[in-house]
Image (spheres, helix red, strand yellow):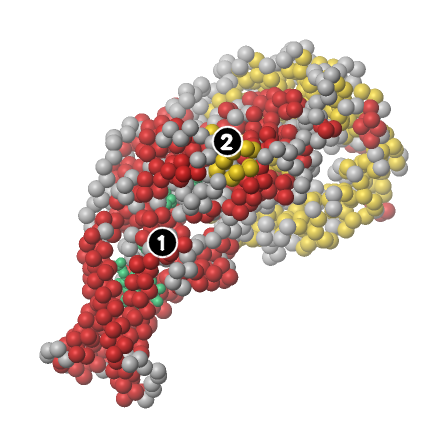
Amino acid sequence: MKPTIAIREPVVDDLMDQTEKILTEEQIEKVINEVIDQETGVRLQTYVNTCIHCGLCSEACHWFLSNDRDVSFAPVTKVKDTIWVMLEKKGKVDAAFIKRCSQIAHTECNVCRRCGMYCPFGIDIAYMMLVVRRICAKLEMVPLYLQDTVNSHAATMNQMWVKPDEWIDTLQWQEEEAQGYVPSARLPLEKEGAEIMYSVIGPEPKFLAQLLGNITVIMKVAGLDWTMPATAGWDNSNMAMYSGDFEVMARVERLHHETAQRLKVKKIVMGECGHAFRGGEYDGPTWLGWMSPPIPIVHAVAFYYDLIKSGRIKIAKKVEGPVTVQYPCNIIRNAGLGSKLQYIMNAVCEDFVDLIPNDRHAYCCNAGGDTINCGPPWKKIRVQSAKIQSENFKRTGAHTIVTPCHNCHSGVEDIVDGYKLGMHVKFFSELLIEAMEIPEHLKPKEE
Amino acid sequence: MYEFVSGPLVWIAFIIFIGGSLYKIYNMLSGAKKDITLFRHMSLKHSLASLVHWVIPFNNQYMQKRPIFTIVSFAFHICLILTPVFLLGHLVLLDESWNISWFNIPDKVADWMTIIVIAGCIFYLYRRLTDPVVKNVTDGSDYLLLAITALPFITGFIAYHQLFAYKTILIIHILAGEIMLIAIPFTRLSHMLFFVFTRALFGSEQGYWKHSKDW
Amino acid sequence: MFNIENWDWESKEKMLAEPAKWKDQFEDVWEPYISPDGEKIASIVKIGEGEFNIAINEGTWEEPFEKIWYSRFSPDGRLTAFITKDMEWTMAVDGKTWEQMYEYIWDTKFSADGKIIAATTKVDSVYSITINEKTWECPTKLQSIASHVISPDGKTSVAIAQTVPLAEGDVNAFTKGAWSVIVNGKPWNDNYADIYGLAISDDGKNVVAEYRNSICEYGILVNEKPWNEKFGCTWEPVFHPKNSDEITAPVRQAGQWFLATNGRIVWDKGFINLMHQTYSPDGNNIAAAVAPSFAKWTIAVNGQPWSKTFNECILKPYFSPDGRKVAAIAKDSGKWLLVVDGTVLGEGYDNIWPPVFGPNGDMVICKVEKNGKYAIAVNGKIRGNDYEALWNPVVSPDGTKVMICGVEDGKYYRKVVLLSDI
Ligand code: HEM
Ligand code: SF4
Ligand code: SF4
Ligand code: SF4
């Protein structure tokens, strides 16, 4: 089979460039065979032997569709250019090849599983891309920014090098902010036996602290018994899951779940993040030997759905004008929260304009699966390859796009900038805070 | 020659086809046990749901988007499997040696079905040559598989119409059919065997584990 | 438990405070804590905007503070909390503050007798451990402290700290090592990519930690010296209770978890996962939470898993004082269960707290939660009434009585009950 012709602008990624220079072919051969023999099995074999090379999966992939149907972005091509060669050559490949594998699996695939839904055999290409990532990770061929994030997870158990005191300090500050709206609001730290442990992802305390204030208000208005840990284990995000460093992934997830066990809560409610839900609900528990998390995890979308549906939170004033939404793959296509998201959007928006395609068929924002975490070197191609979703947004004519996922949030902001859409990008909780009713007795007293 | 290909070789082909298929499936299932999570994430209900949505034409969004491909693909596969099984000529042979028989399709219809299979192969070949994505993942083996699939039908068609050298063509036809049978378990034609399993897995993962759907 | 012989084991029932009344007295009342001997109950209370105090039994601390958090009783019954004044923080013990103020202070730890109180502190962006008001004199400017541990006698304190500043995205410096272990203010010689699972032996002589060099390269360090063996992953090591030279840790090899002592694999069977290994009090037996197959959890004692497994999870095992029985809390199909030697006792609950053994091991007592109320369960069956708040029961040193502290009808009771009566 002739190699695929892939034309890409050269990208400088310091870590990948450095690794390319020092990797030896013996190392590569050893790691590839080790991973394929020990960490995969019939699943990979069956996928490879069943794929009839029909190319039907290409229609699913936003990379392919956004780049004028460039063959080199088609899902099956990604498999051909990585796994097929590794298997055929029994691991005898060079460092440049591994670098290209890393580029394909990390920066040109969001492991969003849309193609799996379009392959007539249900071949899970995202799974194969994760196998490639695992091989690359073991060879330390990982995009620099992503590896730095994984290092942060490994050292601090959070994604953003947040130090323990900074975390607590931020929560205490946001508690005060929340008291500006609702004076009796409290952000209870380390409250053993609370009903809910609320967990967030690293960027919240680092850049988006007001979201912590928002949830403090929402919890008070809903009258819930909740807590947040004052120790590591508060961060539910997990880039190690995506880089292929499953050991670090597992340690982070274990700590997150054991923090909930230690606090004796009934459930973990997590902020608006897609991949964090995937790590907490699926990939992390599976590696650790749990069928599902021992303390159930509830994603913000399902949580808000329950609050609104049960009337615990009432909507006072719906958001005006057309609003649309990004359906985060990790909670919609791969967790089935689509109709709940539609419900809460309709509940708080006067004019919710849906996307086409929507729900589990919606396109990925192209930030997920670690792609955005590969950092500035890879941004241009990422935004360029989100063209199809930018057109979908444009068609809605909305003034605001709601993104119940942190990666989507940043990714959609880049789309809005890159394609000059002139739309706002907001988390659902930001709309909810504006729209919800704050009961009289909780309002600040006028003096 | 004719006696050999239509006698012992048929036996051998069927034994290899059935034995090989069973072996391949056994191998896959026993290997799957080693994947500790695989079966735990599967459910019969969601496996069946997935199959229902993918073996009935136009029962998922994706097929609706590609009507021509869907029609060709279903017509091709239906004819591919039904024609040899219900062809009167085959049934007569079966009756002669085993004294069993079942419903047959009229020769006229079978003739058209054969043409559909051949046309399907031409369609696939055309895609392989022209669709850039398909072309890029095509090598000799793909053409070979198409040839293995098409040959029994082409030769069968020629033999039925007795266009030329009937005896030779008939022998080639039988041989081609046997090659196809033998090839199924050991080439990517084994998609016939694995289809059910890959679908069941993805359907279960999406449906049972991830509370979503795969259609 | 410190000084347990001298606690009041005679008074049958004392009503010591009425926390319900606090709600009328103060703007906001936080969750209460009790002293180990059950004599005191305390809650952080809000008395006005930017004004907090601690209500304790019938009174409060003398002086209110701008903010108070993390109220914890020391083993000798003193109440500690972090307080802030003019944007600076310090520790308050029974209402009296440490002299020094800090940029931040958190994570209180006590010696077994409670005489020594330690916490992580930060001054001018340098991190340290402060022990009874004395801050480590560390030759290295610590960039961060992830966690710290103090020996039971309080003489040794150790921390996992970042010893080298890291620029953003400097993966090479990270790989070379930026983290180390600090023992009584003195860093170990080497730096590591990552350090986890820090522990001190009970006699305070030895310090152990996990280290990670790179992906799939983990090991155990004992007083700076690594085990010869390296592993694909490790979990927290623990010391033998009597022999501080024996260390046991779960280690991962070829995709399975094993138990290793001093580097050598000691259980012949591998598991999908293996955590929370625990020695019996005499150190002769080890129990651990294991998954013999995917999503089937149980306890293995000396490598032999119980035949009964649980489909959600199992927590840390507890040995009876004589080391013959093992109890654990497991979760199966949404319910928490008390399991002793592989047998489920009683029914399922919404929550179960760590079990306590009676003296000869045939009685297991624990706090349980059902329908939002708390109760004491003996061998898994609820005995006595419900409480609005309840603490873990404590068995008297002579093994005849149990102390039960809880809030009923807004009143805080400390009860001492004969084991034979509950
Ligand atoms: C009942 C069993 C079978 C199932 C479910 C099945 C399914 C499929 C599917 C899903 C495809 C993908 C593309 C498409 O939809 O056309 C395909 C393609 C194909 N199948 Fe099958 N198949 C079966 C049996 C067979 C058999 C027995 C043969 C031949 C011996 C065969 C030959 C082919 C060929 C030649 C292609 C087209 C490959 C190309 O694009 O060049 N199939 N099959
Ligand atoms: S997983 Fe998503 S991004 Fe990756 S190839 Fe498939 S459709 Fe494209
Ligand atoms: S659609 Fe499925 S079978 Fe066809 S090329 Fe893609 S992965 Fe292979
Ligand atoms: S970032 Fe958002 S849309 Fe994109 S992969 Fe995650 S969940 Fe999917």
Q: Can residue A339 be seen in this view?
A: yes
| Foreground: disc 2 or disc 1 | 1
How crowded is the residue under tag 1: few (<14 C-alpha within 10 Å), some, or many (20+)? few
Q: In which quarter of the image is residue B168?
A: bottom left
Asked if residue A394 is positioned above or below residue A168 in the image, the reply reads below
Pick the quarter of the image with the C terminus of chain A.
top right
Q: Which chain carries label 2?
A: A
Q: Is residue C111 visible?
A: no
Q: In which quarter of the image is residue C366?
A: top right
Residue highlighted by disc 1: B65
Front position in the image: A277 or A430: A430
Residue type pointed to by label 2: Lys
Residue at (74%, 43%) from the top-left corner?
C372
How crowded is the residue under tag 2: few (<14 C-alpha within 10 Å), some, or many (20+)? many
Front position in the image: A336 or B75: B75
Left or right, C88 with respect to B91, comes to right
- Tell me the element at label 2: strand
Residue at (42%, 28%) from the top-left corner?
A422
Residue at (57%, 16%) from the top-left corner?
C122
Q: Where is residue A320 in the image (x, y as percent from the top left)?
A: 54, 33
Q: Where is residue A269 in the image (x, y as percent from the top left)?
A: 59, 38
Residue highlighted by disc 2: A426
Q: Of the numbered discs in the image, which one, if any, rests on residue A202?
A: none
Residue type pointed to by label 1: Lys
Q: Where is residue C178 in the image (x, y as percent from the top left)?
A: 44, 23
- Tell me the element at label 1: helix
Q: Which chain carries label 1?
A: B
Left or right, B96 with respect to C85, comes to left
Residue at (64%, 29%) from the top-left corner?
A217
Front position in the image: B202 or A295: B202
